[in-house]
Image (cartoon, coloured by chain):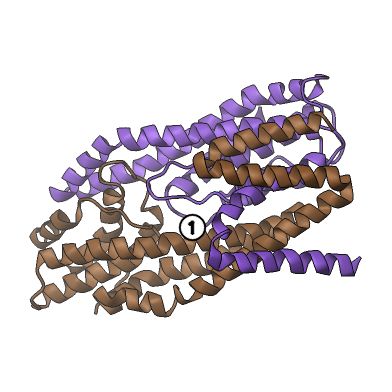
Amino acid sequence: MSGKRPGIWRFFLLQSSRNDRTIDGLGFFYAIHPFLKALADDEGQLREMAGRHAGYFNANPIMAPYIAGAVMNLETRRKAGEDITAERIERAKSALSSALTARGDYFFDVILLPFALTIGSIFAIYHSYIGPVIFLAIYNLYHLQSRIGGYGAGLFNGEDVWRELARTLFRAQSYLAGCAAFVSGVFGALVFLRAWNFGGPRLVIWGIFAVAGVSLMRLKFNILWTVLAAFAATALFLSSW
Amino acid sequence: MTSILAASVLGGLLAVEHRSSLRLMVSQPLVGGLLTGILLGAALQGFIAGAFFQILFLGHVQVRGERSPDLPSGGVAAAALYILASRDSGGAPPVDGGIMVWSMLIAILVAGLGMYFNAIWCARSAGLADRALEHARGGRFREASSIHLSMLAVHFLYGFTVIFAALAAGRPLAAWAAGKPGLIDAGPPGLILLLIPFVGIGSILRIHLAKSHAFWLASGFLLTAIAVMIWR
């Protein structure tokens, strides 16, 4: 496999032209173009490959380098004479986008981001600047690993790249999920203890109602309206203090 | 005016970081508030406002296909408004609750505005992206790339404009409203900072109340409570 990586940084701009029709299609083409250019022998071949990859693309942006690497693996093998059709490449791109996005969204957005933010918030309630530092370090440890190493992993493993991810990144998922829940429990306990120390049972009872109210509202309403309503209620409670 | 311009430029840059999928997370209010504070010469105030704005949305998970609030712009607005309105009111106790309340309310509205702007932009820019893809298929790669990159300018301009407008209008409003007796009495200094995290806990519970997480959630809560009580 060719080891040329002329534009890894382009994956960091993948979603700049996100839209409702082709989603990140233009961004994916922008990111993959230098790799296609490095592979093509002439302008005609480049145009033919571009025609196949300038279209719809919808995937988790952190997983996109893995998908691009796998696509380039197939393109390279096709060019070398292996029996790989354009349809197979398209199918692989589509299948990998769905599978890796489902896992990537869960890992990065549901587990890792709230986990790192909760740790940062624990320090923040004590006004400690170390919170943002820890938050950035935890998140980017996994994020940059995927963004920078993803293309190479995809290029090396081709369509089997998800196996590599299951062996490395997603193995961390189960224990990180437990850690995220544990840290949220720590955060909750600290918030309630601080409230008890400052305002006694009255503040704690308000806290219990607020937590229950927000949890129930989130079942029906989106986060913005829930937060707005909860914050307005908090402001009214302050006035009655 | 210089402070408003500086915060607006930062708002624009963080909007680019957020929308371009750079995803280094420096645009999250926890970090963005601190950056705003450093820029405006009040690091601690900016950090507190940004961090507590973040805590309000702690349980927010971006679901694919669902519009989500523009937290980076909200974070900069919360921090900058809090700093500038506190200055206007002639210095304040460590945490001026009234100004904090009004800054947060305006920042939540800014975050909501960003959500709707992005929805409209994603619908409207589809035609432009289609044209760029046509260029790509026709071999005019430079034109396709230019259109893709030019959209970064839209994100910057949106971030810049919304922060500029929020600060220009919100700064006197927050200072006036906080000083007006009877409108919202924010109670003792610091009380608001004890109440905001309850909202965050409520929203994050939704993620961790699943059967597989509940044990760890309860363990974290109980162990911390016991440890703090023993420590005291």
- Kindly identify which chain the residue marked by label 1 belongs to: A
What residue is disc 1 on?
A: A109
Please identify the quarter of the rendering in which residue A202 is found.
top right
In percent of width and height, residue A237 lies at 77, 33
Please identify the quarter of the rendering in which residue B108 is found.
top right
Which residue reaches farthest right? B232
Up-down relation of residue A42 to residue B66 (above or below): below
- At a point 20% along the width and 39% down the height, the residue shown is B131
Quadrant (top left/top right/bottom left/bottom right) for the N terminus of chain A: bottom left
- At a point 52% along the width and 34% down the height, the residue shown is B112
Quadrant (top left/top right/bottom left/bottom right) for the C terminus of chain A: top right
- Near mark 1 (Cα within 10 A), the count class, few <14, some 14-19 or many ≥20, is some
Which of A145/A226 is in front? A226
Instruction: Tell me, yes or no, if residue B72 can be seen here.
Output: no
Residue type of the residue flagged with mark 1: Asp
- At a point 42% along the width and 65% down the height, the residue shown is A147
**Which lettered chain is shown in brown?**
A
Secondary structure state at the residue bearing disc 1: helix
In percent of width and height, residue B183 lies at 77, 20
- At a point 47% along the width and 64% down the height, the residue shown is A107
Up-down relation of residue B113 to residue A47 (above or below): above
Instruction: Tell me, yes or no, if residue A121 can be seen here.
Output: yes
